[in-house]
Amino acid sequence: MSQIRKIREEEITLAKHLLTLAEKDPEAYIFPAEVDEYEGGVMGSINFTLGDSGDYAGDIVQVEYTDEDGVRVVITLTQNSRGEILDMDFWKENFSKLLKYPTPDKVSINTRGI
């Protein structure tokens, strides 16, 4: 189930950092005032494009983070066919609730795959 809510500053900060890691200019992207939160916010996944989100057109970057319980979290920033940020998708290996939202200094490029 999803829920529309205001975007949080920490989400904008992380998304801009991920764009920088992908060697993209974060200032070239528009961040909406509201996002669609997936799964009731359990893992942290959000959709940036409300309504007609366009077709998925690939991953921009994928990083990993270790949550406070020691469980690996893979975070993927995706884009749509219009070149907009589509999703920031969080996948926690054991499917449990995200305990602490990652800060830019706690993520690294995912080299292990999902």
Image (cartoon, rainbow, N blue to C red):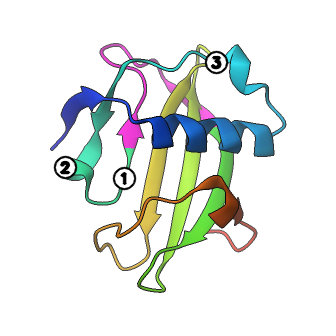
Instruction: Assign the N terminus to one quadrant of the image.
Output: top left
Q: Spatial distance from mark 1 to mark 3, Cα to Cα? A: 20 Å
Q: Quadrant of residue 78?
A: top right
Tell me where residue 37 appears, x and y as whole percent. 28, 39
Q: Spatial distance from mark 1 to mark 2, Cα to Cα? A: 8 Å
Kind of residue sitting beneath label 3: Tyr
23 relative position to 45: left or right: right
- How packed is label 1: few (under 14 Cα within 10 Å), some, or many (20 or more)? many
Is residue 61 found inside the magenta-colored segment of the image? Answer: no
Query: Camera-side residue: 102 or 52?
Result: 102
- Identify the magenta region: 46-58
**Element carrying mark 2:** helix
**Element carrying mark 1:** loop
Tell me where residue 8 appears, x and y as whole percent. 39, 36
- Extreme residue in the left direction: 1
Decide: is 4 above or below 98: above
Query: Camera-side residue: 109 or 8?
Result: 8
Q: How many labels sit on residues? A: 3
Tell me where residue 61 appears, x and y as whole percent. 69, 46
Residue placed under numbered mark 1 in the picture: 44
Q: Spatial distance from mark 2 to mark 3, Cα to Cα? A: 25 Å
- Extreme residue in the front direction: 9
- Extreme residue in the right direction: 23
Kind of residue sitting beneath label 2: Gly
- How packed is label 3: few (under 14 Cα within 10 Å), some, or many (20 or more)? few
Mark with earlier residue (1, 3) = 3
Residue placed under numbered mark 2 in the picture: 40
Instruction: Assign the C terminus to one quadrant of the image.
Output: bottom right
Kind of residue sitting beneath label 1: Gly
Residue placed under numbered mark 3 in the picture: 29
